[in-house]
Amino acid sequence: MNPNLDKLHPYPFEKLAKLKAGIEPPAQLRPISLGIGEPKHPSPAFVKQVIADNLDKLANYPTTKGSEELRQAISEWATRRFDLAPGSLTAAEHIVPVNGTREGIFSLVQSVVASHGAAKVVSPNPFYQVYEGAALLAGATPVYLPCDGSSGFIPDFEAVPEAVWQDCQILFLCSPGNPSGTVIPRDTLTRVIELADRHDFIVASDECYSELYPNEDQPPEGLLQACAAMGRDDFARCVVFHSLSKRSNLPGLRSGFVAGDAAILKGYLKYRTYHGCAMPLHNQLASIAAWQDEDHVRENRAAYRAKFEAVVPILREVMDVDFPDAGFYLWPVTPMDDETFARELSAQQNVHVLPGRYLSRTVDGHNPGENRVRMALVAPLEECVEAANRIVEFVKANTP
């Protein structure tokens, strides 16, 4: 067996199941899950119809690169959404479809890391667990940059030792952030690109929450957009990940893409031809329909906006909680340690959240996720409001 498997940590939800083992919540209270970031809004009917109309495509092998039509639809969407120079993000060279961002992130790390003792993969802390797992299984050493309230939940890149940058092969960004929802501003993205130029590492930006934002006139900026603003239309050393899971409520479609530096993606595509992860043709056709429609995405944003506007004022009665820049998570401070909060909230109110420490690593005695919990507002509005009211009742009953 690969000895690096022994370095993997249990996944957060495995830890959560162990934490709640033996709990018997009140039977009269229906369970409400705010723990898992799985969209619960209806999937677009027109996308489901495309799949139904193309089930005959099950008889065909898909190509690893995906169809020209899919890559063109993605190119047009990304160029329009991120104000890129026309023709700079080409379907032929700058886009690779993937089966969701988790698969794409993991496989990209395996394809680009030159495994040796000094190889480092740098990521925010808290972080999406696949950043760490992919690094460990590629033979690299993860480096965690703290993201807490004192830094506005954005890493302090200036505080990173020069030796770390010298050994860095990939820097992961997550914007909007999971779990904080913080959007990294353009000037910080520009600084990161300059660091990558100086030290020759890849900047990999996970932007799968980019289409869930409160103000229709202020969509979050992305890494390729920062490149374009710098006149870097070759997107050198930069790649981004996007997905239909959150944008279009299609987590089961397993459809996303990687875009950016053509030289990186050329090698990545070669890796994928052996990896064996081509997207099924009917999923490709459904993805084209999803990327070409914005009406359902605006409706999706409106539904999340209504939940935040209803839930945050309720929780503020007993918790320190802010509206996120984007995404569908709340990241409140807990009035007791986060594990106790999550366990007892489940036991007393049948409401389920994720302890923040499960999304983080302790470095130099500090875990940026401690005394916070992640709440995913994915349940229907009525359930989210009910959950918020139960949380208020729980906090009042368990604090002086």
Image (tube, helix red, strand yellow):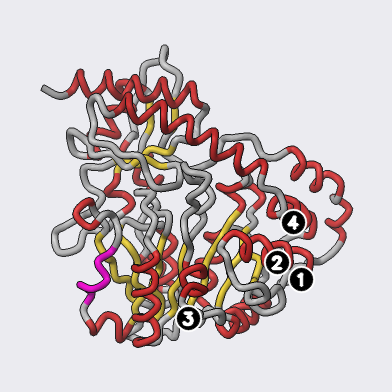
Q: Which residue is mark 4?
A: 288
Q: Earlier in the sequence, mark 1 or mark 4?
A: 1
Q: Is residue 56 above or below residue 192?
A: above
Q: Earlier in the sequence, mark 4 or mark 3?
A: 3
Relative side of 304 to 64, left or right: left
Neighbor class of circle 2 (other Cα within 10 Å; few <14, some 14-19, many 20+) is: some
Q: Is residue 289 above or below residue 302?
A: below
- For the residues labelled 2 and 4, the Cα–Cα distance comes to 15 Å
Residue at 28% over, 55% down: 153
Residue interval drawn in magenta: 155-160
Q: Amino acid at mark 4?
A: Ile
Neighbor class of circle 1 (other Cα within 10 Å; few <14, some 14-19, many 20+) is: some
Q: Amino acid at mark 3?
A: Arg
Label 2's element?
loop
x and y percentages locating residue 131 in the rendered image: 41, 65
**Front position in the image: 87 or 380:** 87
Neighbor class of circle 3 (other Cα within 10 Å; few <14, some 14-19, many 20+) is: some
Kindly report which numbered mark, 2 or 4, lies closer to the viewer in this rendering. 4
Q: Earlier in the sequence, mark 2 or mark 3?
A: 3
Q: Which residue is mark 2?
A: 278
- For the residues labelled 4 and 3, the Cα–Cα distance comes to 27 Å
Q: Amino acid at mark 2?
A: Ala
* Label 2–label 4 contact, CB within 8 A: no
Kindly report which numbered mark, 2 or 3, lies closer to the viewer in this rendering. 3
* Label 1–label 2 contact, CB within 8 A: yes
- For the residues labelled 1 and 4, the Cα–Cα distance comes to 16 Å
Q: Which residue is mark 3?
A: 237
**Front position in the image: 345 or 378:** 378
> Looking at the rendering, which quadrant does residue 280 occupy?
bottom right
Q: Amino acid at mark 1?
A: Thr
